[in-house]
Image (cartoon, rainbow, N blue to C red):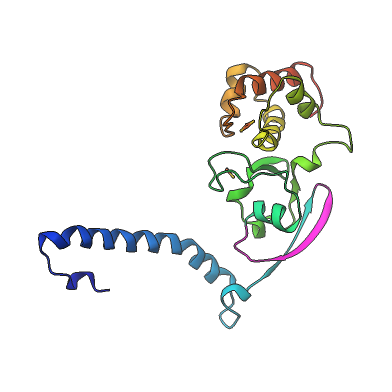
């Protein structure tokens, strides 16, 4: 549609503005996928959904080789391809922390991470934290301190809590709150989560 062809009377001004905004938003939302597509597809290669890439990574100590759409996030790879549904999809937008995993020992939001970019990386999810039937000390502490209600945020909270202690950022309640602030809990279990983390830190348990 040629927006400039719309007569410039008052009634059409709102419509003109709306159309321009819609086109701008549509253009912005298309840009990342187009750029990624252009970067990955050879000039004479296939296009569209036919493009797949092979990725090899270690998940919870096991080597995995998968063939995926290059636009797939690590979160979707874990949940949809590898059946590791412990890692939760909350916002899918980098806002809630429910999808937190460890990549090469560092916490990361798997919903904001392309799986393709983790080729060769070591990923740890909540399923890889316990030692067989034996729960991780932080999982035990969350249960002991009622650090969960519905439990939806809990895998991400626990993965962040482990990282928080390993990073040396669990010296006090305010510090824990600060370094756990990327993990939201709709049930408001925050005080109990902080207690659980502080106890594990205080007892010097290996995380
Ligand atoms: S699902 Fe990743 S931050 Fe919310
Ligand atoms: S325990 Fe329900 S969202 Fe945190």
Q: In the displayed structure, does residue 41 sit left or right of residue 129?
A: left
The stretch in magenta equals: 60-72
Q: Position of residue 105 (x, y in %)?
A: 73, 41
- Give me the residue at 59% from left, 43% from top: 90
Give the answer, above or below, for where 66 lies relative to 61. Answer: below
Q: Nearer the viewer, residue 37 or 90?
A: 90
Q: Indicate the quadrant of ligand 1 in the picture.
A: top right
Quick one: which residue is furthest to the bottom in this view?
A: 44
Give the answer, above or below, for where 22 lies relative to 42. Answer: above
Q: Quadrant of residue 132?
A: top right
Q: Nearer the viewer, residue 58 or 48?
A: 48
Q: Quadrant of residue 135?
A: top right
Q: Position of residue 171 (x, y in %)?
A: 66, 18
Residue 46, visible in the rendered structure = yes
Quick one: which residue is furthest to the left in this view?
A: 9
Q: Nearer the viewer, residue 205 or 129?
A: 129
Task: Please state, as top left, top right, bottom left or bottom right, where the N terminus lies in the image.
Answer: bottom left
Residue 170, visible in the rendered structure = no
Q: Position of residue 48 (x, y in %)?
A: 56, 75
Q: Position of residue 158 (x, y in %)?
A: 70, 32
Give the answer, above or below, for where 181 lies relative to 175. Answer: below
- Give me the residue at 52% from left, 71% from top: 38
- Give me the residue at 20% from left, 57% from top: 14
Q: Quadrant of residue 98?
A: top right
- Give me the residue at 53% from left, 47% from top: 93
Asked if residue 184 is among those painted magenta in the image, a careful observer would answer no
Asked if residue 67 is among those painted magenta in the image, a careful observer would answer yes
């Amino acid at each position: 549609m040629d927006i400039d062809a719309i007569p410039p009377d008052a009634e059409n001004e709102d419509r003109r503005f709306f159309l321009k905004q819609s086109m701008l938003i549509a253009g912005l939302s298309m840009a990342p996928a187009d750029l990624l597509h252009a970067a990955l597809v050879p000039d004479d290669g296939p296009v569209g959904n036919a493009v797949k890439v092979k990725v090899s990574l270690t998940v919870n100590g096991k080597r995995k080789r998968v063939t995926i759409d290059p636009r797939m996030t690590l979160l979707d790879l874990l949940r949809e391809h590898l059946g590791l549904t412990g890692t939760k999809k909350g916002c899918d937008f980098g806002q809630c922390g429910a999808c937190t995993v460890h990549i090469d020992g560092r916490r990361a939001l798997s919903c904001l991470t392309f799986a393709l970019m983790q080729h060769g990386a070591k990923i740890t999810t909540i399923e890889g934290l316990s030692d067989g039937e034996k729960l991780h000390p932080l999982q035990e502490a969350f249960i002991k301190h009622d650090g969960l209600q519905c439990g939806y945020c809990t895998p991400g909270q626990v993965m962040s809590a482990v990282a928080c202690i390993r990073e040396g950022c669990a010296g006090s309640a305010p510090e824990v709150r600060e370094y756990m602030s990327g993990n939201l809990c709709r049930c408001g279990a925050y005080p109990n989560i902080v207690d659980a983390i502080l106890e594990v830190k205080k007892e010097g348990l290996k995380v």
